[in-house]
């Protein structure tokens, strides 16, 4: 029966090995790595997929990520991870507040997902032979800064003040505004920006996105600007010989003493 025992040990070993490379799935999204082993200082790609929209924070143990915060919008998005010198690289993705499904409903289960990749040390084919310097120079790993260095909205001031690490902003425009021009500058001159230029807007809330991208990587970064155009009254009432306009929303308004505003 010794062969039976050995067979069982082999089967258990196979399952343990497969368990190290199987993507770990959270209720909100799935997460996988492009490899299960990486050389010291090497890179690999972690991909998040899911039919959800919102910010996701990336935390890495024993390594670094090309981005610490990404935006997922009912699709797949990848982040490049650079490994440390030894041990295991652990990557964890944690959803931010306000994660929603395709219908705009809040996602109840916002548990994080993680994946681990082992750093594999190089082995020598002949340990007794003295090592000789390599004739070829290894190329350093190139990384790209996808941050913006500035955002300008004609005729408006961003809130909060601009920071390359902050991706959500808001501006307010006066009544009757039908278009707005947005300009932006990338921190890396090789990074392209989508979404700059003139945009049509309507009264009320508008969302304009600026997305940075480099041709040598599939990773992108998106900045969102909530543009509010002051609204005109939709209903008019007469009180004490005065005509009073009723606005369709309470944006920027404060409740009168003794009253509450419910949105």
Image (cartoon, grey):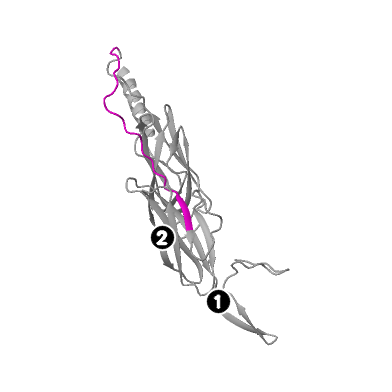
Res 52 seen here: no
Above or below, 34 relative to 86? below
Residue 126: where, in percent of width, then height?
27, 15
Q: Is residue 136 magenta?
A: yes
Residue placed most toward the observer, 87 or 211: 211
Magenta segment range?
128-151
Q: Residue at x 32, y 45 (%)?
A: 216
Q: How many marks?
A: 2
Q: Residue at x 32, y 33 (%)?
A: 139
Main secondary structure along the magenta-highlighted residues? loop
- Quadrant, the N terminus: top left
Q: Residue furthest top?
A: 128
The quadrant where residue 64 appears: top left
Q: Is residue 166 magenta?
A: no
Res 7 seen here: yes
Residue located beneath label 1 in the image: 232
Image side of residue 238 versus residue 81, left or right: right
Residue 253: where, in percent of width, then height?
63, 68
Question: In 3D space, how far apart are the residues under numbered discs 1 and 2 (Cα atoms)?
Answer: 28 Å
Residue placed most toward the observer, 4 or 117: 117
Residue located beneath label 2 in the image: 196
Check disc 1 and report its element: helix, strand or loop.
loop
Check disc 2 and report its element: helix, strand or loop.
loop
């Amino acid at each position: 029966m010794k062969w039976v025992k050995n067979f069982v040990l082999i089967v258990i070993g196979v399952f343990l090995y497969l368990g190290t490379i199987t993507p770990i799935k959270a209720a909100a999204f799935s997460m996988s790595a492009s490899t299960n082993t990486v050389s010291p200082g090497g890179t690999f790609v972690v991909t998040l997929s899911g039919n959800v929209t919102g910010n996701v924070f990336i935390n890495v143990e024993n390594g670094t990520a090309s981005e610490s915060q990404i935006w997922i919008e009912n699709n797949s998005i990848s982040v490049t991870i650079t490994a440390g010198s030894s041990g295991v690289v652990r990557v964890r993705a944690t959803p931010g507040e306000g994660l929603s499904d395709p219908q705009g409903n809040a996602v109840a289960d916002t548990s994080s997902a993680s994946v681990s990749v082992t750093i594999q040390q190089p082995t020598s084919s002949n340990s007794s032979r003295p090592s000789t310097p390599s004739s070829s120079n290894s190329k350093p790993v190139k990384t790209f800064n996808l941050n913006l260095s500035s955002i300008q909205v004609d005729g408006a001031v961003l809130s909060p003040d601009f920071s390359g690490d902050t991706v959500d902003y808001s501006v307010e425009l006066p009544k009757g505004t039908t278009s707005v021009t947005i300009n932006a500058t990338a921190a890396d001159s090789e990074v392209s920006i989508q979404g700059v230029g003139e945009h049509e807007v309507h009264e009320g809330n508008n969302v304009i996105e600026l997305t940075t991208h480099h041709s040598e990587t599939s990773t992108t970064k998106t900045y969102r600007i909530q543009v509010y155009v002051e609204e005109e009254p939709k209903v008019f009432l007469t009180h004490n010989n005065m005509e009073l306009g009723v606005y369709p929303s309470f944006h920027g308004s404060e409740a009168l003493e003794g009253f509450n505003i419910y949105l």
